[in-house]
Image: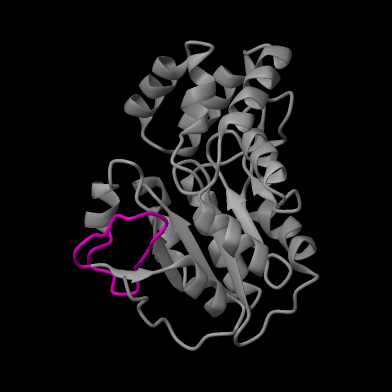
Amino acid sequence: MLQYLTSDLLAASLPALVERWRPGARRWALVVDADRTLAPDDTGRRVGEAFAINEPIRAVFEALGYVEEAFRRVSGIWSEVPPDRYLAEVERVAVETRIYGGWTDLFSVCLARIPIFVVSVGIPLVWRRILASHGFPEVPVIGGCHVAFDRHFICPRVKEALVLQLRQLGFQVAAAGDSLIDEPMLRAADLPLFVPDPKGSAALRQSLADDPRVYHLKLDERTFSGLRVMAPHALSRLLTDAGEGYADTPL
């Protein structure tokens, strides 16, 4: 059984992950959700289809909500999948998944200058493979779901805790997500970035409507009324201290 990644465990491991960067008044960190934020795909559902476990997983969340106990039970479902078959499906989906070009450009500019974390309540192993194939093997992916490959599982509150602990270490934090699961993380960030899923993430957009700090990180051609826009190149300038302020990016 996987262990839950508590705030204390996260706090104990985080300083080593950011030690190469010295926090300061203008030093940023970036925290990014994985599925449907880095890429339009939901890789967990794609892997789950091969083992007919998407419905049992959905039933757990419908019964319990997105709480720690639900993710504990879901990790148990994943851990029943034979490791060799699980790994084969992870590799297949990783090969077929392409992240948004805007993230590729942003990571290329920012990775040597600021800490970047990907945090996923899905399958972190598939995202490690995807990031490595895009040239970013050093980006930490926090999460877990299969006992044969992972040490910890997480829930949405761990995403929020990661942001809060980075701020306690002295960083300003930008965070990007696509769903209500990401809302606590986004509200905890200094700069919340809305990334719409293929359906537009209406629930998250509505929930964040009262937060004037939110920007729509524009990774495709869609626009949403009421949300200021930031392009990836403008975000990379801001995060690396090459730009001033959060000026809207012209469409």
Q: Is residue 200 left or right of residue 133?
A: left
Residue 195 at x, y percent in the picture: 39, 55
Q: Is residue 206 left or right of residue 8?
A: left
Who's the residue at 29% across and 55% down the image? Answer: 222
Is 171 in front, or is 129?
129
The N terminus sits in image quarter:
top right
- Looking at the rendering, which quadrant does residue 77 occupy? top right
Check the image and name the residue furthest to the left. 225
In the image, is residue 201 above or below residue 122? below
**Is residue 71 located in the magenta-colored stretch of the structure?**
no
Residue 205 at x, y percent in the picture: 26, 55
Q: Is residue 204 left or right of residue 1?
A: left
Who's the residue at 70% across and 41% down the image? Answer: 133
- Range drawn in magenta: 208-226
Our reading of the magenta stretch's main secondary structure is loop
- Looking at the rendering, which quadrant does residue 237 occupy? bottom right
Who's the residue at 58% across and 72% down the image? Answer: 167
Residue 136 at x, y percent in the picture: 71, 52
Residue 18 at x, y percent in the picture: 74, 66
In the image, is residue 112 above or below residue 184? below
In the image, is residue 50 above or below residue 58? above
The C terminus sits in image quarter:
bottom left
Who's the residue at 59% across and 85% down the image? Answer: 242
**Is residue 223 located in the magenta-colored stretch of the structure?**
yes
Is 216 in front, or is 2?
216
